Amino acid sequence: MAQEIQTHRYSNGLVLIAEPMPSLESAAFTVLVPAGGVYDSRDREGLSALTCEMALRGAGARDSRKFIEDLENLGVQRGESVSTMHTSFGGATLAKNLPAALAVYADVLRSAHLPAEQLDAGRLVAIQELRAIEDEPGHKVMLELRHRHYPDPLGRPTEGTMPSLEAITIDEIRRQYQGYYRPNGTILGVAGRIDWKALVDLVGGLLGDWQPAERSDVKPAARGPNIDHVPHEGNQTHIGIAYDSVPYRHPDYFQASGAVGVLSGGMSSRLFTEVREKRGLCYTVYASYHTLRDQASVLCYAGTTAERAQETLDVTLGELKRLANGIEPNELARLKARVKSSLVMQQESSSARSSAVARDWYHLGRVRTLDEIGRLVDALTCESINAYLAEHPPKDFTVVTLGPKPLAV
């Protein structure tokens, strides 16, 4: 049975998208606010992330403690993050508790306290997250890779830098909140056991009179160096490789994504088989697809010992180039099985669907149902993927290494 996707645009620009899932007892929501790290100035990187942290420290009639208690009493499993383009808030709970949970987050969006006396505590959280990256060199090299591969500021790490985090003031946070937490450009995705008409009225009552603000355009500048090395003490080397792909909204997205799935999807994938299993070169190797609205990339990672790093890089690049020769029927069969398993799990998760419908609306201006995605996956053939690879072969690589010494590319 096809899913029924409902949409409503309020007069202030806020878009509500919902997918009723009557077989579930839960309901989930995802809010995408156009307040991503891309809007941070160069000397205040991390401002959006710190603003998100501070927005959760009391809102409306709730102080910081009451905010947490109310969500826990509602059984809300929550999460928040800051990406390149958005600040995201999400939660899942019993369907009957959805209205109360949305009321809490409406206050976060409209009337966060941003208490000056808690700035130091919020700053410490942001600094600890930044320091944690230094303890995860595999994560760090991928952040450095995106920073160099995408035009600035699209690739900047949203976590910021130590000097910028230490310099941010409460007044700057309040200006950021007032300027970028706005209904025009905000997307609210809901999925689960819901009543659509009641939901439209509820959200209208909570956010319908939220005042819009002017939107800022981002003008990408130059990319960073395509070959770079980050010195790091130790006997491990971490390798990041990126190359351009087509964005999610492109007609060839499923061919592009399918090719990445053959490259890195399970223990039968090419990278795992050739780089790790057959040669024993590294302990971790993978490739993933990453998309912005108008640009996308394939991001690859390999972690190995310093002694085997050069060979690992050479073999990994070789596998990426070999992908242009095409995929085989057995690889396509495994790919389809994995994707269909993922679709089944999405069908059982209100959280996954609320996130997906919000993301689809941002990228496409509409929502792909799971049935539609299933048909597009079924339509994939070796010929269609190989034709895509012939036209878009992996090339023009950005390579960043992190370790004791640079490698030859």
Image (tube, grey):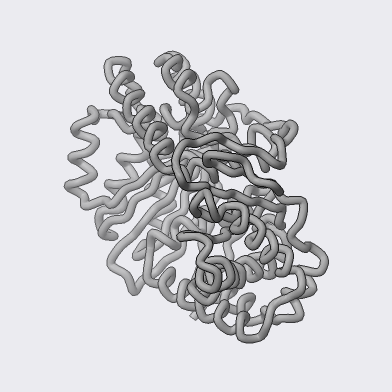
Q: Quick check: can you spot residue 10?
A: no
Q: Nearer the viewer, residue 257 or 89?
A: 257
Q: Position of residue 8 (x, y in %)?
A: 53, 52
Residue at image coords 79%, 73%: 387
Q: Nearer the viewer, residue 392 or 5?
A: 392
Q: Position of residue 388 (x, y in %)?
A: 77, 69
Q: Quick check: can you spot residue 6?
A: yes
Residue at image coords 71%, 81%: 382
Q: Nearer the viewer, residue 272 or 187?
A: 272
Q: Nearer the viewer, residue 226 or 211?
A: 226
Q: Position of residue 400 (x, y in %)?
A: 62, 43
- Say left or right for 58 vs 373: left
222 versus 246 height, above or below? above
* Residue sitting at the far right: 391
Residue at image coords 42%, 61%: 352
- Say left or right for 202 vs 326: left
The picture quadrant where one finds residue 92 is: bottom left
- Say left or right for 399 vs 141: right
Residue at image coords 62%, 41%: 406
